Image (cartoon, helix red, strand yellow):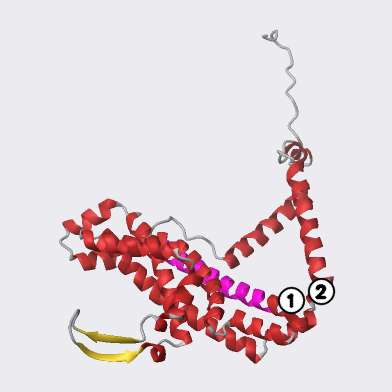
Amino acid sequence: MSEPPGATVTLPEAPTATEAPKALTAQRVLPLRRPGRWIATAVVLILVAQFVHGLVTNPFYQWDRWSYWFLRPTILDGLLITLEVAAYSAVLGLIGGILLALARLSRSPVLRAVSWTYVWAFRSIPLIVVLIFLYNFSALYKTLSVGIPFGPAFFSFDESKLATDMVVAVVGLSLNEAAYAAEVVRGGILSVDQGQHEAAAALGLPKGYQFRRIVFPQALRSIIPNYVNQLIGLIKGTSLVFYVSLLDLFGSAQTMGSTYPGDIVPLLLVVTVWYLILTSVVSVIQFYVERYYARGATRSLPPTPLQKLRTGLTDLRARIRREAAV
């Protein structure tokens, strides 16, 4: 609506310096309240607090005896045997798994059939059966010989002298681990894009070089998480070597438990804590290995736990300052 000539027009007053922040504050968007999340968090914290309280205050756990046994030489000797068996079996199992996976992916029907049969057999037979069978292998074959197939032998040796408890444990775990590692490696190789194989072949690179420098490094991004799960299972599976007379960590605790029946629970807790430590160390190594092989595949590397903690503290301080400013 137009004003008559000569009329005075009154403009709205601009907000003063003190009123401007109030206007902006009044327009601040509040986050959506989620009471269900807070209730669930409170319930979980209460349950965790009750569990920790019962774990600490229950005299049945005998934490004084746990601290006595935790670093005893007997336990540490068993821990060393567990590490040796796990290390040897992991390396041999991975090498065997790579060979089986390559045989499964080869064009030879014989190699594919043998690899498939091996994987099928050892994934079907329980590990404890494999270990006990190898432990009594000398009953089936007292001597082993090397020579011409179906012909004369060059030399022979006593199997019972060669197959010590450590050898039986490592061989049994390695044979079992190779069957599972073969499927992990095969799945990782198949996850590599077919264009990578075609590009490597177009460059005229030898097959061995293609696998070592192009295919396998890319397959590792898929192999590592799955194989680490197998490795953790292998560490826990070493507890079965007690049944072939090898005193590993679990076997040492079992032996001490039979000598000191009143300390069975503390000894089991000692074994539990050591296994937790070993698997945690493996998980940390897995994170950094995955982070290393993620270079070039992601725009930015995943943050380390220390970086996550630092970012979280920075965000928390910034949030506190915003709340205080309101």
- Label pair 2/1, CB-CB below 8 angstroms: yes
Q: Residues within 10 Å of mark 1 (few under 14, many from 20)?
A: some
What residue occupies the far left of the structure in this picture? Answer: 204
Answer left or right for 85 relative to 188: right
Task: Give coordinates of residue 187: x percent, y percent.
Answer: 37, 57
In the rendered image, the quadrant that contains the N terminus is top right
Of residues 210 and 226, which is closer to you in this image?
226
Q: CA distance from mark 2 to mark 1?
A: 8 Å
Q: Amino acid at mark 2?
A: Phe
The quadrant in which residue 279 appears is bottom right
Q: Mark 2 or mark 1, which has the lower sequence index?
A: 2
**Magenta residues, start to end:** 270-295
- State whether residue 206 appears in this view: yes
Q: Secondary structure at mark 1?
A: helix
Residue at x-position 28% and y-position 67% = 213
Residue occupying the point 51% across, 72% down = 128
**As shown in the figure, which amino acid type bears the numbered disc 1?**
Val
Name the mark on residue 60: 2
For residue 265, what is the image quadrant?
Answer: bottom right
| Mark sitting on residue 107 | none
Tell me, for residue 265, which label it has, or none. Answer: 1
Q: Could you tell me which secondary element the residue under label 2 belongs to?
A: helix
Q: Is residue 214 visible?
A: no
Q: Residues within 10 Å of mark 2 (few under 14, many from 20)?
A: few
Where in the figure is residue 237, as x and y percent of width and height? Answer: 53, 72
Residue 144, horizontal then vertical, whole percent = 31, 86
Q: Is residue 301 magenta?
A: no
User: Chief secondary structure of the magenta span?
Assistant: helix
